[in-house]
Image: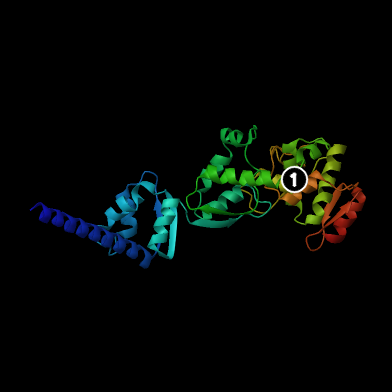
Amino acid sequence: MLKNLFILIIIVAFAVTFAIGYWINTCETYLKNNYVTLELHIEKGESFNKTYNKIFKHLDTPPFFKSYLKYVYHFAGKRKFGYYRADDMPLSQLIKNIKKGTQYNIKVTFPEGYNIYDIAKQLDKADIIKYSAFIDNVTNKDFVKNITGKQYPSLEGFLYPDTYYFPKSADPADVAKLMYQNFLQKLPEDFESKVNKYGLDLYEGVILASIVQKETYSKSEYPIVASVFYNRLRKGMRLQSDPTIIYGVYPKFDGNLQEKHLENAGNPYNTYQHSGLPPTPICSPSKGALKGVANPADTDYLYFVAGENGSHLFSETYREHVNKVNLHQK
């Protein structure tokens, strides 16, 4: 009797083990052999059922498949919130991505000379961060001090222009921190000590680099343009830089710089009306512009005017400058 009972228990245990093994194999095969195309946003605190329905609601799944994901695959407890995208991807890979937090990243490129408003606009357009959310973050003085250790009014000038990959609906703070860390990595060696020799601190050096960046995109001209502004600062001359005025009316500037803008002394960025550097950087300078400010050319130039093919013509005297203006612009 006991022997028969023992045999029965073994048979039942074997049958159960076989059934469980068959069930697990069926579920694993299902995940490997079924492909999906979808966009998925898993929110913070989202229930397992909600996530499951987003993925599998319209799919023909094996029996007790939800239990398999929850108790065997541990999908319920190991999900990472974020944005995911699958383009004809095996379900197994999608589930692994969600467990690892491997989100779908959107490629976005910020050209040299973009300011915080340009950056915010591009992030918004790419559905990464809302415009206002990003601006609020990078102009929050507490946040700026937290990551820079300084009392800067904003992160203008410190968000390095480069190509990045961000998840959809990214955290504004995470994006700003990454761009700032990139700036620190790209900052030329001994930048601060080098600009100190010209009477500037690090922040003022970045301000000047941002002006140089907006005045020319020719790498060979960065040191020369920097020398012009250093010479003007040393002589007590106003910088008279159009890009600084434009930044002072951003983002409402319509592309048409007018006489009223040049005469507006209420604009603190108007370097035609105010001496010295503007209050903040006016854009994100490239490594080349930063190098140009750290290592300016040795010149006596005080003026420059746009020539052909984006290049500039430099002059030591105002009369020479006027002649070049009349020759090349009028």
Asked whether, in this view, residue 321 is left or right of residue 128, the answer is: right
The secondary structure type at the circle numbered 1 is loop
Task: Identify which residue, 71 or 213, lies in the foreground.
Answer: 71
Judge left or right: residue 68 versus residue 154.
left
Residue 271 locus on image (x, y percent): 76, 41
Task: Choose top left, top right, bottom left or bottom right for residue 218.
Answer: bottom right
The correct choice, above or below, for 85 with respect to 207 in the image is below
| Front-lying residue, 114 or 83 | 83
Residue occupying the far left of the picture: 1
The residue at 75%/49% (across/down) is 289
Kindly identify the residue that appears in the image at 72 percent across and 42 percent down.
Answer: 206
Query: From the image, which quarter does the C terminus lie in?
Result: bottom right
- Look at the image and tell me whether residue 273 can be seen: no
- Near mark 1 (Cα within 10 A), the count class, few <14, some 14-19 or many ≥20, is some
Q: Position of residue 49 (x, y in %)?
A: 29, 51
- Is 136 displayed left or right of 115 in the figure? left
Residue position marked by numbered label 1 in the rendering: 188
Judged left or right of residue 238, residue 127 is: left
| Residue 124 image point, x, y percent | 52, 52
Q: Residue at 32%, 49% (x, y): give it.
A: 48
Residue 5 placement (x, y as % from top left): 11, 54
Question: Would you say residue 108 is visible in this rendering?
Answer: yes
Q: In which quarter of the image is residue 263?
A: top right
Indicate the quadrant where residue 3 lies: bottom left
Name which residue type carries label 1: Pro
- Total labels drawn: 1
Name the image colouring. Answer: rainbow
Q: Which residue is drawn at 92% across and 50% down?
A: 319
- Foreground of the two, 48 or 3: 3
